[in-house]
Amino acid sequence: MKYSIGILICFLFLSFSTISSGQKIALVDIAYVLDNMDEYKKAQEELDKVAEAWQQEVAVEQDKIKSMYNKYQAELVLLSEEMKKQKEDEIMVSERDVRAMQKEKFGPEGELFQKRQSLVSPIQEKVYGAIQAYATERGFDIIIDKGGSSGVLFSDERFDKTEDILRALKN
């Protein structure tokens, strides 16, 4: 009887220590957080205005090219081979310039991307800082974006096993 009580106590102690050592995990919806921040909304509005203005600039240039092409088509019969070639070259240069303008404004490293970085990155950093402070203050080990776009937002360094994997691969 004494042994069974001792075994029961040991079992309860081990069970409790296993349960208490589990990770504390939380979910956060980053998109929802950002959508409810006035400064993020203002940044998005500014980005939308800039993008719309640049898109209008591109549209104006594309309309000019269409006009050049239509004029070229109307005059085609009257033009010499040299004049045809000159007009075609002008149209192609204009088209290339418009594509360059689009890339400059909207490309992966374009002005819109850079403007987004300058306006939105500080807000995102503020949110991630708040998440990290919250996790540290409340003892969370891992915080995951429940929207899934960002993945893990915070994790305690003790759960990073990257070096272990590298060592295993080298053996």
Image: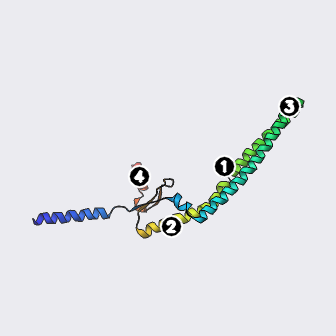
Residue underneath mark 3: 76
Q: Residue at x 34, y 61 (%)?
A: 22
Q: Secondary structure at mark 4?
A: helix
Which of labels 1 and 2 is toward the front?
A: 2
Residue 83: where, in percent of width, then height?
88, 34
Residue underneath mark 1: 107
Residue underneath mark 4: 165
**As shown in the figure, which amino acid type bears the numbered disc 1?**
Gly
Residue 5 sits above or below residue 59 on the image: below
**As shown in the figure, which amino acid type bears the numbered disc 3?**
Leu
Q: In terms of sequence position, does the residue under pointer 1 or pointer 2 come before the other?
A: 1
Residue 44: where, in percent of width, then height?
63, 59
In three-dimensional space, the C-alpha distance between marks 1 and 2, rounded to whole angstroms, equals 31 Å
In three-dimensional space, the C-alpha distance between marks 1 and 4, rounded to whole angstroms, equals 37 Å
**As shown in the figure, which amino acid type bears the numbered disc 4?**
Ile
Q: In terms of sequence position, does the residue under pointer 1 or pointer 4 come before the other?
A: 1
Q: Secondary structure at mark 3?
A: helix
Q: Residue at x 19, y 66 (%)?
A: 9
Q: In terms of sequence position, does the residue under pointer 2 or pointer 3 come before the other?
A: 3
Q: How many residues crowd mark 3 within 10 Å: few (<14), some (14–19), many (20+)?
A: some
